[in-house]
Amino acid sequence: MPDATQVLRTRDAYAGGVIEIVVWAVPRPVPPSDHGFKCRLVFARDGERVVGYDNKRGKGDHRHFGGKEGRYAFSSPEKLIADFQRDIAR
């Protein structure tokens, strides 16, 4: 990702799975998102995504939870991480 600056990268074992959080600051929003971050947060177990948040180009900010995908209203990286952690705790 040219011109992106990695802000955060963590990878930890949790509850028989893995939590990975990666956040980059980008000079231009990733369409159709309107903020300056590219994010990928995932909790996976046995090779399957249990919870995930990302802002893939063309899809914008969205959340994977309970086998469903839905829109996510991004406000800040801190709120995104808190929401992700809340979903994992469920």
Image: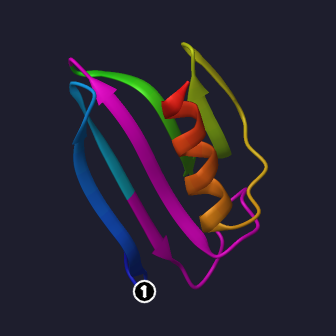
Task: Using residue 73 as the reference point, say whether residue 5 is left or right of it.
Answer: left
x 23%, y 48%: residue: 12
Percent across and percent down for residue 59 are 65, 42
**Does residue 58 appear anywhere in the picture?**
no
x 62%, y 35%: residue: 63
> Identity of the amino acid at label 1?
Asp
- Using a 10 Å C-alpha cutoff, classify the residue at mark 1 as few (fewer than 14 neighbours), some (14 to 19) or many (20 or more): few
Give above or below for 53 relative to 27: above
Dot 1 corresponds to which residue?
3
Task: Using residue 22 as the reference point, say whether residue 18 is left or right of it.
Answer: left
Q: Is residue 32 magenta?
A: yes
| Residue nearest the observer in this picture, 34 or 11 | 11
Tag 1's secondary structure? Answer: loop
Residue stretch rendered in magenta on the structure: 22-46
| The C terminus: image quadrant | top right
**Does residue 85 appear anywhere in the picture?**
yes
Percent across and percent down for residue 56 are 54, 48
Here the colouring is rainbow
Percent across and percent down for residue 51 are 48, 30
| The N terminus: image quadrant | bottom left
Give above or below for 61 relative to 71: below
x 76%, y 67%: residue: 34
Picture quadrant of residue 5: bottom left
Q: Is residue 43 magenta?
A: yes
x 38%, y 25%: residue: 49
| Residue nearest the observer in this picture, 27 or 46 | 46
